[in-house]
Amino acid sequence: MPIIKILPHAEYCPAGAEISAPAGTTICEALLENHINIEHACEMSRACTTCHVIVQQGFESLEASEEEEDDLLDRAWGLQPNSRLSCQAILAQKDLVIEIPKYSVNHAKENH
């Protein structure tokens, strides 16, 4: 079972964490199942960028993103070449290190 190391994030995971999840699980599902309540305003339907993560290690083990995900990521705060929507990034057998960006664009939460 792959291990996901989450770097510290002031709101969602202040001390950082290491969790495990079965291959075939999305990063978002793994975080939520381990009580790391990352935003996912569209309920993981690939319609927003609130679950954006930066994969610091293990990025190459994830299946390539689809065009719809790439188009959405263009709107994400803090976009990096190794950014993914955690609701679309499916775990393989390799361990990951991820960073949850400091901010996210969540119009519902911001009353827009």
Image (tube, rainbow, N blue to C red):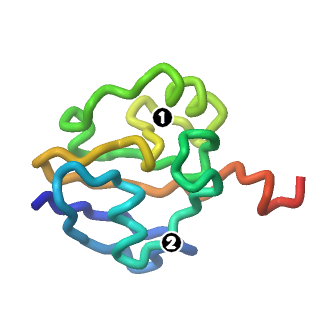
Image point (25%, 37%), residue name: 62
Image point (48%, 34%), residue name: 80
In front: 40, or 13?
40
Q: How many dots with numbers?
A: 2
Which residue extends farthest right?
112
The numbered mark at residue 80 is 1
Classify mark 1: residues with Cα within 10 Å, few (<14), some (14-19) or many (20+). Answer: some
In front: 46, or 99?
46
Q: Earlier in the sequence, mark 1 or mark 2?
A: 2
Mark 1 or 2, closer to the camera: 2
Image point (44%, 38%), residue name: 83
Residue 6: % across, % down: 34, 64
Q: Choose top left, top right, bottom left or bottom right for residue 99.
A: bottom left
Q: Choose top left, top right, bottom left or bottom right for residue 34.
A: bottom left
The numbered mark at residue 54 is none
Location of residue 49 with respect to 74 vertically, above or below: below
Label 1 sits on a secondary structure element that is loop
Q: Amino acid at mark 1?
A: Gln
Mark 1 and mark 2: span between their CA atoms?
22 Å
Q: Amino acid at mark 2?
A: Asn
Which residue extends farthest top?
67
Label 2 sits on a secondary structure element that is loop
Residue 40: % across, % down: 57, 57
Q: Which residue in the protein does label 2 denote?
A: 37
Residue 16: % across, % down: 36, 73
